[in-house]
Every structure is written in structure tokens, then in C-alpha cells.
Image (cartoon, helix red, strand yellow):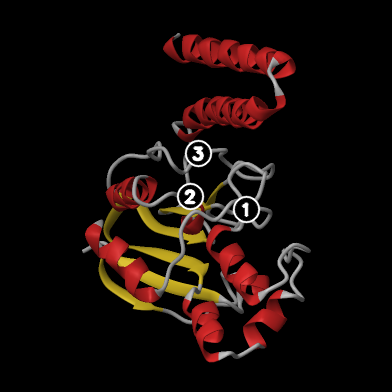
Amino acid sequence: MRDRGERFRVRLGALALKTLKRVMPDPVRPTLRRAIEEADVALQQLDSVRRASRLDPAGPLRLNLGCGSKPRPGWVNVDLRPGADLHLDVRRPLPFPDASCAEIYAEHVLEHLAYPGEVEQVLADWFRVLASGGTVSLGVPDTEWPLRAYVSGDDGYFAWCRTQPWHRDWVRTRLDTINYHFRQQSPTFGEAHLYAYDFETLADRLVAAGFVDVARRPFDPAFDSEDRRIGTLYVRATKA
């Protein structure tokens, strides 16, 4: 009954925002659009939290967070896109008990979360749900490569960027490319880059959350996306 009441309040709020958007001046509309998107995500969250309580995995719980269009068999695949097992907002606490999970995998997720503020809370929650000996395996854009290329004058990185499907026409100079790497502006909800990582920085965040044995790992074709092989920093850490 409580969930039904919360759903009603969120739906009512979203309807009010959509009505406002039609009558408000243009400068206000992007803010209202973001609020509407947040309301839609909140509704998906409520539905998936209820479904998560009914999950009965065949083996140890393994979470593939931010699965996109590539769910993994045998894992609980989480994303806001269609095709995921659960449509959860990873900024919120995961709806799983403490120490209930054997492994967490998240490829190109963490850079979309704000730091400070969201990243610390998210990593602390991932630590919470992992059992002792459980691992977290992460992939994030490797920021050392573009910075070294910029300072050394090596055009290899910038030439590679110009061949990628995510390259934008307005990115014309080397510094445009650096800006895009750090911020990767996108009007699509959840797709903007909010923070950049090298190994030192990512390791610091993981250690602060309680993880140990933080180490780089190589690209793993059994798990990692082939289109992410170049330009990704892969790291694994353990909950003692």
C-alpha cells in the first residue's frame, strides 16, 4: 500500500511538471525536462525494487551494473535501458541485503556519477552488498592517455578520437577533445561524463570505501566490451 501511494505521488508530480513545461519560457524548459526524467527514473526504481525482492538466483548473486544493451547470462543485469533485468537508479542504495553479493561488474558507469557527492555513496553501498571476499570490477575512461598525448604533442589519441562514433563535429581542437573527455556533454539523461579517472584517483575512491587489493587488470574478452578495449582503465578490488 505504501509503494502504491508513493507511485501515485511521483506520477502526479511528473504530470504537473509536464504541464508546466508546456507553458514555461524556453530558458526554464531544460531544468523541467531533467525533473521529468528524474520522476520517470523514480517510477522505474519503485517497480524494480519490488521485483528485486522476488529474485531467486540459481547461484551466488552477481550484479552487472550499467549493462546497457549487453546483459550477461547468469547475472542480474541493471540499467535504465530496455532489456535489463532491473531498471534501477544506481545512485540509490541497491535493494539487496548486506553481504548478499559475490561480484559486482560496472563498465563505464562511475564516470557518469558526480564527485564529490554520489561516487562515495555508491561505492559504500556496493561495499555493503558484497560478501567478504567479493570483488568489484570496474572499467572507466583512461584519463592518463589523453593528458599525456596533449602534453607530449602526440596526435595518436586525437586521431583515434576523430574515428569514434561518439566524436562530435564541434570538437575541432586538441583542447576541445580534452574538454569532451572530461565532461562529454550529452542531453540524454545519465550519459554525460561528470568526473575523470586515472588509476591513482580510482584507487583512492575504492580504498576510501573500504576495498583492499586494488589493482589494475587487463582487458578480459570474456566479460569486457570489445568496443571499450582501447582507452579504458580496468581495475579490480576486494572486500576483505
Q: Is residue 91 above or below residue 40?
A: below
The residue under label 3 is 89
Q: Is residue 223 above or below residue 148?
A: above
Indicate left or right for 197 with 183 as reference: left
Residue at screen point 47% across, 79% down: 144
Indicate left or right for 201 with 39 as reference: left
SS of the residue under disc 3: loop
The residue under label 1 is 185
Front residue of 168 and 2? 168
Q: What's the residue type where badge 1 is placed?
A: Gln
Point out residue 237 in the picture as x, y percentages from the top left corner: 33, 68
Which quarter of the rendering shows the C terminus? bottom left
Query: In this rendering, which labeled residue sits more in front, label 3 or label 1?
Result: 1
Point out residue 98 in the picture as x, y percentages from the top left corner: 28, 43
Give the mark nearer the N terminus: 3 vs 1: 3
The label on residue 58 is 2
SS of the residue under disc 1: loop
The CA span between labels 2 and 3 is: 24 Å
Give the mark nearer the N terminus: 2 vs 1: 2
Tell me, yes or no, if residue 229 can be seen here: yes
Indicate left or right for 108 with 59 as reference: right
Q: What's the residue type where badge 3 is placed?
A: Asp
Point out residue 159 in the picture as x, y percentages from the top left corner: 71, 82
Front residue of 207 and 181? 181
Choose top left, top right, bottom left or bottom right for residue 171. bottom right
Residue at screen point 46% across, 64% down: 196
Which quarter of the rendering shows the N terminus? top left
The CA span between labels 2 and 1 is: 40 Å
